[in-house]
Structures are given as structure tokens and as C-alpha cells.
Amino acid sequence: MCQTEKDINFTKQVYEKYENNRNVSFILAKDPLELRKIYSEVDLLIGMRLYSIISATSVGTPEIGIFDSGWGKKNPGTMKKFELPFILNLEGEWHIQDYIEDIVKNRQSYSKRIKEIIGYEKANLVNQIKAHSNLC
């Protein structure tokens, strides 16, 4: 999935490594509602942008992150929060096939864990808001 023009070349490099797999597609889309629909229908997202990771996570779709350390800590931090794999720094050879196979094979458990974490965080936020509103 590619959302921005500047990511097309790298996204195509990733795609070309797996294009012989009939289950791998290259999609260029920019509309947020269309993206959310697509994310809800795929087994796995390989993402580089935090917004794609957040969108996929919000619909329970597991993802693999590919990030550069210069992009900051929020990308790996988000992946760690949801216990999802990521590759940091794109130097040298990187192998994601094992991650792909594990997530596709165990997609239901990944999706369930993502939804449980989201549910916990929502409940925690609601409790914080209630506690704060009682102080006012």
C-alpha cells in the first residue's frame, strides 16, 4: 500500500521482492476512507508511515513496520505498544518473510490482541476523563 508519491519507489522495491506471490498486491490510494476500507480487508499491511499503521491498527489489521531511526521514536513505539514487528533502519539486507508468514498464519490472534489493546486504552482514557471531570 502506497499513500504518497515520494514512497512509490521504495514501496515498489518491497513489492518486487514478493510480486510472484499471488497474495501480494501493490495499491496506490490516497483517500482516507478508501484506505481504511482496504486496510480492513487485507490480512497484513507493510507500512512505513505512522498514519497507515494507525489506520490499519484501528480496524484490527496487523502490520509490519519499516522505519528509519531518523524518523523518530513514535513509529517503533507504536509497533511496540501493539506487539507488532518492525524493521528499523533500512541499511543492508532485511528479511521480512518470517514476519509475513507468522502474521498471516496467526492473523486472528494478532487482530484479537490489537483490538484488546485498543479496548483497554479506550477504557483507560474514559476513566481518566471521568476522574478529571469529578475534580472540576
Image: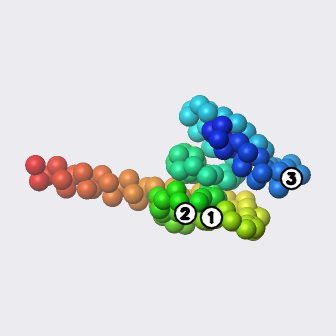
Query: What amino acid type should be assigned to the residue bearing mark 3?
Result: Asn
Question: Badge 1, how many Cα within 10 Å: few under 14, some, many 20+?
Answer: few
Distance from the alpha carbon under mark 3 to that under mark 1? 25 Å
| Mark 1 or mark 2, earlier in chain | 2
Label 2: which residue?
69
What residue sits 30% from the left and 52% below the top?
126
| Sequence-first disc among 3 and 1 | 3
Q: Which residue is mark 3?
A: 21
In the visual, does 17 lie left or right of 118?
A: right
Q: Are marks 1 and 2 in contact (CB under 8 Å)?
A: yes
The residue type indicated by label 2 comes to Ser
Question: What residue is shown at x 48% (from left), y 59% (from top)?
Answer: 72
**Residue identified by numbered label 1:** 89
**Closer to the camera: disc 3 or disc 2?**
2
Please identify, in this view, whether the residue under mark 3 or under mark 1 is nearer the observer. 1
State which quadrant residue 31 falls in: top right
Looking at the rendered structure, the secondary structure element under dot 1 is: loop
In this image, 126 relative to 7: left or right? left
